[in-house]
Amino acid sequence: MLTVSGLKRLHLSVSFDLQDGECVALQGPSGVGKTVLLRSIADLDPNEGTVKLDGVLREAMPAPAWRKQVTYLAAEPGWRSDIVQEHFVAWDNALSLVKRLGLPDDCGPWSIQRLSTGERQRLGLVRALMLRSRVLLLDEPTSALDSASAAAVESLIAERVSNGTSVVWSTHDNAQARRVGSRIFAMRPDGSIEEHRP
């Protein structure tokens, strides 16, 4: 279980528990702090408060180890190399996910520059899923995708959730929030969250 208690960053002040195998949809207007919240939980930005995974404090493990367990996926993933497959420890092992998300299986040697925004978004998701994290923090993972690609992403994440992965999924799509989330967290302008049932 992920426990977030008194997490503070800028105007945010948030507390919640996320059970194993639970997907929470995070909603709110642009600029309200959804990305700030996700990045703070992943310890990518300075923040205050207590965050635990299975009772173990975030500070009790090295930051890279925490981020491998509690993985943040940006809406626009970053790329340190220009070749797709160089971003994967084992490209061959990633191919089944690559194909499942509708990408060509020969895209490994492609330049990142050749990819559309939606292709980069799906490959970023594959890269995150290869870590087999306990918790996925997804920042609008289907914002650049057509409905078929978005459905493939939803299906894949639903499988991970059914196998025990916990997910916080930020989305502007109300219908998607109801499909993917067993709970919906609405971020308010004052930096708090209000819980709704889908």
Image (cartoon, rainbow, N blue to C red):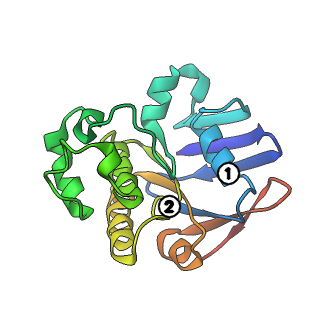
Please tell me in which quadrant of the rendered image residue 6 appears: top right
Q: Amino acid at mark 2?
A: Cys
User: Residue, x 46% and y 25% (percent of image)?
Assistant: 64
* Residue matched to label 1: 16
Q: Residues within 10 Å of mark 1 (few under 14, many from 20)?
A: some
Please tell me in which quadrant of the rendered image residue 7 appears: top right
Identify the residue at the far bottom of this view: 175
Q: Which mark is residue 115?
A: none
Percent coordinates x, y for residue 103 in the rendering: 23, 60
**Mark 1 vs 2, N-terminal side:** 1
10 displayed left or right of 160:
right
User: Residue, x 36% and y 73% (percent of image)?
Assistant: 151
Percent coordinates x, y for residue 156 in the rendering: 32, 62
User: Residue, x 70% and y 61% (percent of image)?
Assistant: 30
Between 8 and 124, the one nearer to me in the picture: 124
Percent coordinates x, y for residue 57 in the rendering: 59, 28
* Residue matched to label 2: 23
Between 96 and 179, the one nearer to me in the picture: 96
Query: CA gap, disc 1 to disc 2?
Result: 13 Å
Q: Quick check: 180 above or below 111?
A: below
In the picture, which quadrant includes the C terminus?
Answer: bottom right
User: Residue, x 22% and y 45% (percent of image)?
Assistant: 110
Q: Amino acid at mark 1?
A: Phe
Query: For the residue labelled by badge 1, is the local secondary structure a helix, a strand or a loop?
Result: strand
Percent coordinates x, y for residue 155 in the rendering: 33, 68
